Amino acid sequence: MELEKVKANIKINGENIPFVLDAEDEPFFREAAIKINERLAELQNKYGAVASTEVLVSTTAIEAMVDALKAHQNYQRLRTEIDDRLAKIDGRLGE
């Protein structure tokens, strides 16, 4: 079954960027745009006089990717811990 696609214009740093998305992903794109724009505003207030827009956008992208990698690493660690605990429980119940 194919997911429903929707067209969405997401505004980042004052620019509308067109996307064709799975309908279920649209709220995530909109929330991400809000967070990106908030972070860009913070960086522009702090470094706008000395850094280009491209540098600030790149900084925001790198920060977001680092956060995503950390979250994935934490998920993997928790998943391993859960699997280990379930294996111990299974071992105890099998005795």
Image (cartoon, rainbow, N blue to C red):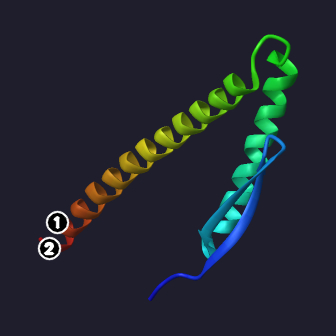
Image point (66%, 32%), residue name: 60
Disc 1 marks which residue? 91
76 to the left or right of 7: left
Q: Amino acid at mark 2?
A: Gly
Q: Nearest the camera: 37 or 95?
A: 37
Task: Report the residue marked by disc 2.
Answer: 94
Instruction: Mark 1: give few (<14), some (14-19) or many (20+) Cα within 10 Å.
Output: few
Compared across the picture, whether 16 is left or right of 5 comes to right
Give the CA separation, mark 1 to mark 2.
5 Å
Residue 93 position within the rendered picture, expressed as x and y whole percent measured from the top left: 20, 73
The N terminus - image quarter: bottom left
Left or right, 1 with reference to 43:
left
Instruction: Give the farthest residue toward the top.
Output: 50
Q: How many labels were placed on the picture? A: 2
Residue situated in front as seen by the camera: 31 or 57:
57
Circle 1: element type: helix
Q: Which mark is residue 77?
A: none
Badge 2 element? helix
**Front in this rendered view, residue 25 or 51:** 51
Q: Is residue 65 above or below residue 18?
A: above
What is the three-letter code of the residue carrying label 1? Gly
CB under 8 Å between discs 1 and 2:
yes
Residue at 35 percent of width and 57 percent of height: 82
Identify the residue at image location x=60%, y=68%: 21
Q: Position of residue 74 (x, y in %)?
A: 44, 44
- The 10 Å Cα crowd at callout 2, few under 14, some 14 to 19, many 20 or more, is few
Quadrant of the image containing the C terminus: bottom left
